[in-house]
Image (tube, rainbow, N blue to C red):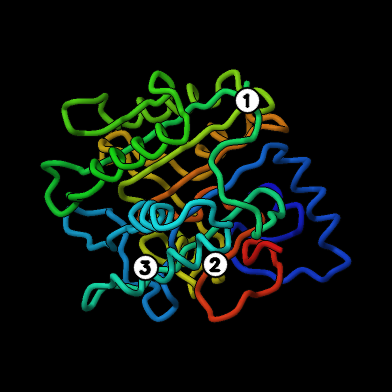
Amino acid sequence: RLARLLAGLGKVGNVQLPPERRQSFSDDAARVMPATVVMLSTALQQEDAGKAMSPRTPYSSGVRGRCTELLLEALGELEGRSWVELCWAMRRLCVAGRRPGENLQSPVLSCSRQLDLSAAASVRQPIADGRCRALLIGVNYSGQEGLEILGSHKQVAKMREYLLQQGFPDEDLRVLADDRQHAAPDRAAIEASMRWLVEGARPGDSLFFHYSGHGSSYTQEAGGGNGGGAGDEKGADAGSCDEALCPVDFRTAGMIFDDEVYRFLVAPLREGVLLTCVIDCCQAGTILHLPFAFKASTGRLPMASTSGQID
């Protein structure tokens, strides 16, 4: 967000920077976001954009988030995949597993700085004494008519298993889920756990944030609802867009908006810290508004642009 504003850009949109501005923009981005923040999400294809609705009423429709499912399946197929290979594998699996009438989603990899897409994808830094800590949130909205999701708890369990395999210690894995077995993912608990995740982070540390649940987006022009935001390629360029995560009690406690997520997760981090985020929801997949992104949605590898592709 802040890096994009330094370049005179809005919150959302794909902008091709001229070559002479790329280095200065990268320097500005590193200054306001000193940590390395990598986020994986999915976005709707252009022909499907705008079909998803924000969960503002008990009867709003939505889109089945598949980011966690596609990511773990792609990682399980082959070890040592590069970032670009991982994104295109997720894209292939999405197309192959698309249900009749289901919206087509494209994997999006965004980052706080330019990323070498040919480097091996990893959630850990190659520093033996660096701390690993993770926060996993799964919200099924059990008992909330029109909002219930069936797979969030399972996705969190699978992600937890993957992180344990990657060397994350069990005592540093925190799970919030509305399953009566873990702490409830209400707004207060999510915000407190975000603070816990980044507390005391030092260079060499590897942090991981996973959210599976509803998201929401609001555009100033549209006055709210489903205009713009994650996965809406048409609406994203229309104007300023606010995105939010929906805790289990969002109807009474409110949503957690993008500025708050940035303040909790990104702003406190120092240079040398790695934060990997997997955002699995239909409407807030670009919630951190990171300055560089690559979307696996076409048949070729595009050039670099801010919030468009990583060089």
Q: Can you name the residue that lies furthest to the right here?
A: 20
At which x and y percent is residue 205?
61, 27
- Residue 159 in view: yes
Amino acid identity at mark 2: Lys
Tell me, yes or no, whether the two marked residues, 2 and 3, touch with CB atoms within 8 Å.
Answer: no
Cα separation, mark 2 vs mark 1, equals 32 Å
Which residue occupies 22% across, 54% down?
57
Amino acid identity at mark 1: Ala
At which x and y percent is residue 14?
62, 69
At which x and y percent is residue 159?
36, 41
Amino acid identity at mark 3: Leu
Which residue occupies 45% across, 65% down?
89
With respect to residue 88, does 5 lie above or below?
above
From the image, tell me which residue sits under label 3. 93
From the image, tell me which residue sits under label 1. 128
In this view of the protein, which residue sits in the foreground, 241 or 1? 1
With respect to residue 27, does 20 lie above or below?
below
Mark 3: give few (<14), some (14-19) or many (20+) Cα within 10 Å: some
At which x and y percent is residue 251?
26, 41
From the image, tell me which residue sits under label 2. 295
